[in-house]
Image (cartoon, helix red, strand yellow):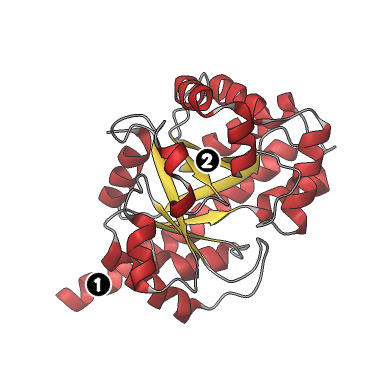
Amino acid sequence: MNRIDKQFAELREKGEKALVGFVLAGDPSFDRSLELLAAMCDAGLDVLELGVPFSDPTADGPVIQRGGLRALKSGSSLAGAIRMIGALRKKTDVPVVLFSYYNPIFAYGLEAFFRDAPAAGADGMLVVDLPPEEAAEMNEYLPDGNDFALIRLVAPTTPPERMHAIVKNASGFIYLISKAGVTGGGGLDPEGIRKQAATLRAASGLPLCVGFGVSTPDDAAMLAPFVDGVVIGSTFENIIEEYRDSPDLAERLAGQVRSFKAAMRETAAMNSHKTGRMGG
């Protein structure tokens, strides 16, 4: 059982949902980024999505785009992200997923990527702009078994028959995009997300995490009952942007992690209490 599978299994036993945090590798610098990631993991992050900065991030909103530019200016790259995972593994055992566009992976070299990323301690990957029909070349290099997860994205407009094709070779968890458009706060439709999550569960037994537009602890608490995890990205990157020169940046991020976890735990406890009362 890899770290991702183990984490979701342990959370299910505790009746909790996963807090998945997205942060760009190297924002604002390698050493500072490593400090921030370690602090967030220590504060209770369940899964880390480590973003690979890219010059043409078509799925990302302005906050993450600016974070990517800062990371690129600091010299960050896919190679740097892999090196950061190796350094982070000395500090934490939290599962790490590389979140990338395909171009950096292709340029790095498929054989080299699938050798170096797992060796550094990465637990999986998510390629934003590579649909299943175009992934055959990459899939040939995937390690055998499920030790290195291939996480698939499902859009809010994806019909059920398309879902089955997308999740066929997925592992780790499924990423349900909460809204049409790019990353960033706003535009959430809780009832639509609930229905899409229920349909997706019929297509895959993997854990289901929802992201895009989830920006506050209240948002996370509202969506957590429908899924197995909630992905937060722009909120963390916004804090980095606003306080990147502050000595307490790491603690600010850690505090935000704790706020999200507390809100999700409170909702889980309330739902458990209601279920128990109804059952009695």
Q: Identify the residue at horizontal 67%, vertical 55% (top origin).
A: 235
The residue tagged 1 is 275
Instruction: Tell me if I can see residue 238 in this picture.
Output: no
Q: Is 32 positioned to the left or the right of 274 in the image?
A: right
The C terminus - image quarter: bottom left
226 or 183, which lies in front? 183
Corner quadrant of residue 229? bottom left
Residue drawn at 53 percent across, 55 percent down: 231
Give the secondary structure at mark 1. helix
The local crowd at label 2, few if under 14, some if 14 to 19, many if 20 or more residues have their Cα within 10 Å, is: many
- Which of the marked residues, 2 or 1, is nearer the chain's N terminus? 2
State the image coordinates of residue 157 (x, y, percent, origin top left). Answer: 49, 74
Q: Is residue 41 left or right of residue 276?
A: right
Can I make out residue 103 in this image?
A: yes
What residue lies at 59% left-to-right and 34% top-to-bottom?
A: 106
- What amino acid does circle 1 point to? Thr
* Closest to the observer, 131 or 167: 131
Going by the numbered disc 2, the residue's amino acid type is: Leu
Residue at label 2? Answer: 48
| Front tag of 2 and 1 | 2
